[in-house]
Amino acid sequence: MSKLRKVNAVVVGSGAGGSVVAKELSEAGLTVVLLERGRHYTARDAHHDILRCQESGNSGPLGFGPDIRANPRTFRLRPGETARIIYPNENGYGRTAAAVGGGTVAYGCMAWRFVEKDFKLRSLYGTPSGTTIEDWPITYAELEPFYTKAEWEVGISGEAGSNPFESYRGKPYPLPPMPHDRQAQFFIRGARKLDLHPFPLPVAIARLAYEGRPPCVHCLYCEGFLCEINAKSSMHVTMIPKALATGNCELRAQCMVREVTSDQQGRVRGVIYFGPDKKLYEQLADLVVVSCSATESPRLLLNSKSKLFPTGLANRTDQVGRHIMDHHGGAGVMGFFEEQVFEPTGPGFTVALADYVHNRGAVLGGGMISTRGEFHHPLTFARYCGGYFGERPWGKKAKDFVRRYFRSCVALYAPGQGMPTESNRVDIDPSLRDAWGIPVVRVTHCLHPMDLRSSHFFHNRMIELLQAAGAITEFLPHQFTEEQTEEAIKQINRGGLGDHQVGGCRMGNDPKASVLNRYCQAHDVDNLFVVDGSCFPTIGGFNPSLTIQANAFRAAHYMIKEWKGGGLRTPA
């Protein structure tokens, strides 16, 4: 194993959290190594192949990783059950793109702030039976300046003040909102009939030229694809170039970290990783920042065992991997119209409403409702709307349906809050290993009754909105009755994670009930930080990427302050 020259900080993972930290630390003068297990894609790698996009489902390889056979996991619904092997292109795996820039390379770009109430769910709603809901150890007021910083550093397009339910902001968006498409016009028509308040959806896409990047050309290949002109405000075209420009940051792609090492005093000393050549390297550092995702960050800590940490790094109270969540309280509904809705432009999601955020009977905080853009391609449309013409999405009946209704579809989406629980977690599978010989994640996840209540609530609200917009009634699904919801709760038998995964290394003031303090610093190890969605105590009713970025700016601010004060340094 080759030992490499010591640096001030090693950041593991280059997604929404890690890239921000690497940029901030390197601009502050620290020497930084940024490690990423995936490839470094550029605009030259962009394509329009729907069968190779990141949202290709079970149809084959993912556009931007992880590699299917090299990265198995196991999954079970409940503790005590036998876990089965699953792969990244299967439902429930909880994949995020394995690439420089992480999930932001191919994400849908929705750039939401949480609202003030999202940070204090326990104070507002208590702790429903079977959940482990906690207030965040920080407030919206503390995070607000960093939301602003993230919006301006990354480049967010939106309209400040258009959402009457948003919490206060110190500065408008840097770019104007995306223009409404035809889907948005139908959405607005239905929303206004219901006395709801639609507004332009904030997105991490440059509406106008921004910091040397060109404006969006409104192609159909946004969510699930790499942007071919770098108008999408992904980390590999925003934060990472700024980090590299300092001369203090070195990016190493295709490097798989095996473990974080620690010394006899219980402080971390660096990482051991497999390089692109499959050889082992040890990178020493004064501090280590883990930013691998809500599934992979706990995996790395749990695989980093030593005499002082026999059950995994920062895991003395058995909290690493617990309370993992996704937006299982959400739903999606399609409506079909007599009029033509389709137009060959992107990104396909330009309008939203937040009337059901802590309001109007929403379950435990609720969430926003927006249009969605995945169904702008006939193959994707056919796969997802199969239920409208039978169990199998092929045959003459299916083809006729696609020909008739592909251009007349409005699809809606709501990311309702998912509930954290003690048993919903990731840990290490006792026998399965990946292509590098590293023990893999075992996901244990089952829906909580509150997830199902919330999902049914949003299902019903979206049907109401589509009806008000003029959707063809015979193709709308039925609303759930209270009796049907109760019966479904008795028969809950599904779970799994998606790409909005959060939790697993939650922040908190109590070391017995959390892994990290309010600055994303491990309670047990003062020079170890975990900065990604895994630090979230609750998930909020919005896509998490902007909150991950804002919190990363906040955590980096603390690291820099401590560093300049003489803290966090490891003796030579």
Image: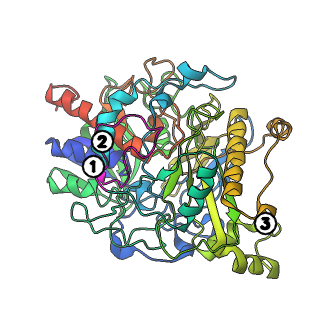
Locate residue 439, reporting x and y percent: 54, 46
Quick one: SS at disc 2? Answer: helix
The answer to which of marks 2 and 3 sits earlier in the sequence is: 2
Check disc 2: other Cα within 10 Å, few if <14, some if 14-19, many if 20+: many
- Ranked by sequence position, the earlier of labels 1 and 3 is 1
Relative to residue 293, is residue 314 depicted above or below?
above
| Magenta span includes 155 | yes
Residue 151: x %, y % from top left: 32, 47
Query: Residue flagged by tag 1: what amino acid is it?
Result: Trp
Label 1 close to label 3 by CB (< 8 Å): no
Residue name at image x 33 percent, y 69 percent:
42
**Relative height, residue 89 to residue 527 (above, below):** below
CA gap, disc 1 to disc 3? Answer: 43 Å
Percent across and percent down for residue 175 are: 30, 56
The disc placed on residue 148 is: 2
Q: Quadrant of the C terminus?
A: top left
Magenta extent: 153-175
Which residue corresponds to the image point at 78% horizontal and 61% vertical from the top-left? 473
**Number of residues whose C-alpha sits closer than 10 Å to that of mark 1, classed few (under 14), some (14–19) or many (20 or more):** some
Residue identifier under label 1: 152
- Mark 1 in CB contact with mark 2 (< 8 angstroms): yes
- Quick one: SS at disc 1? helix
